[in-house]
Amino acid sequence: MGRTVAEADGNGALDLLRIEVLAARIEAHGRADPDAGNLWRSEMAVAEAVASVALEGRRLSETDLLPRVAGGTVAGDPVAGEQALALIRALKAPGDPIAQPAETLERLERRVGGRNWNDDQTEPDADASLSALRDALATLRPGDPPILAGLRVSAAYAFATERAQPVVERALFMAVEGARRREAPGPGGAVTHEEDPLRGLSGRVDADWVATPALALSTHGYKPWSPASPAGLADLLEGLGQVLGMEIGRVGRARDWLRRARACGEGRHGRSRLGDAAQAFASAPCLTAGLLADRIGVTPRGAINLIDALVAEGLLREITRRRTARIWSVPGLAERLAARPRKVAARPPTETVVPDPQAGRAAMARAFADLDAALGRADLLLGRRRGG
């Protein structure tokens, strides 16, 4: 039986502190080399979107996405595939719910669908959703670290909307967490929101999130997303610790790819565009020859020659495995999109239990009060050690 935050007491705070340290290490890798952060988040957006859809009982694997983008025989649940592609785009540019709540919520609900993806579900009232988000943002505290901020807002939003939009709740968690990591508030920056012809699989990321809640709840079997309950909060913290511990190595792999990609153009003829081609894939890790040609200003035949050279260096993989309309990707993303298809069992549907409003609000308040108290004790202890 999973432990609750209240039962774990100080251990819950220690878990949160450990998770924040792991997340800060990944964030530091991304800040030291933004291209590495872009590559890692491009891959994680795909994995998180598929996991988030699967948490809602839909049948989907990562390998089901590519045929929807590249054409050919489409397997799996068609609704799930479309929702995952939409969620990838939302996670790559979620906006800043703290600085611009209305614009961010509209973006998330429009791209994700704003519903629980059941046929009998109706669109939520936009004004009610925005009011719920503003009430949830009011629970933030100035000293909240990023993951705690995301937990606090997503839990309050889930409670206020009666768990009507769990996929939006998880996207909101990531958007708030990323917004707290931004050096300057507000969405956007140097990155332009370009149209992605590969429906989310290509293009840069305009986000700063690190924690992935759906992956955390599905690493070792499915666990329910329930950030407003003490048990759900404890399960999420446990899963985040496992996922972030594994992802530190994956960020390192992205940095190693970039080192090799940047070195591949060195020492070649002065007119060689191999370095430019490698940089194009660092910015957009999934491209066709035509897209590469447009990005760096070469002929289609020249783009094919450059891609062949990058494949020979082990820097790219062809993921469509056909003679026409081919797509190439960096190895990390290729492993997810073009791996051998596997059967993915949908999570058995469970009955949604709507708790008593007063009891649910009290349980949520107790869960976060336990974390706040334990974090306060941890701060006091660390302060004493520093003073000693």
Image (cartoon, rainbow, N blue to C red):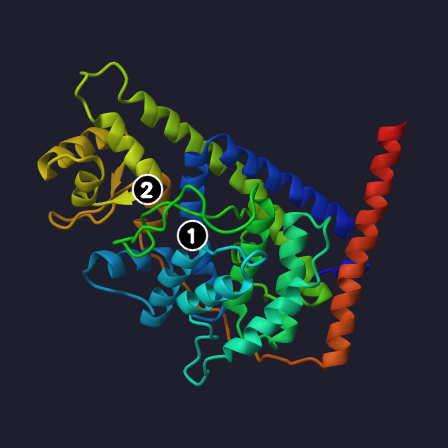
Q: Check disc 1: other Cα within 10 Å, few if <14, some if 14-19, many if 20+.
A: many
x and y percentages locating residue 367 in the rendered image: 76, 62
- Residue 350 location (% of width, % of height): 56, 77
Query: What residue is drawn where x is 57% and y is 41%?
Result: 183
> In the rendered view, would you say 102 is above or below 115?
above
Residue at left 23%, top 33%? Answer: 311
Res. 315 in view: no
Q: How much space separates mark 2 and mark 1, taking CA atoms?
A: 13 Å
Q: In this view of the protein, can residue 6 be seen by the observer?
A: yes
| Secondary structure state at the residue bearing disc 2 | loop
Which label belongs to residue 285? 2
Quadrant into which the N terminus falls? bottom right
Task: Tell me which label, 2 or 1, sits earlier in the chain.
Answer: 1
Residue type (three-letter) at the residue carrying disc 2: Pro
Q: Nearer the viewer, residue 124 or 325?
A: 124
Indicate the secondary structure of the residue bearing disc 1: helix
Left/right placement of residue 224 relative to residue 293 reads right
Question: From the viewer's perspective, is 222 left or right of 70?
Answer: right
- Location of residue 268 by image quarter: top left
Residue that numbered label 1 is attached to: 92
The amino acid type found where label 1 is placed reads: Lys
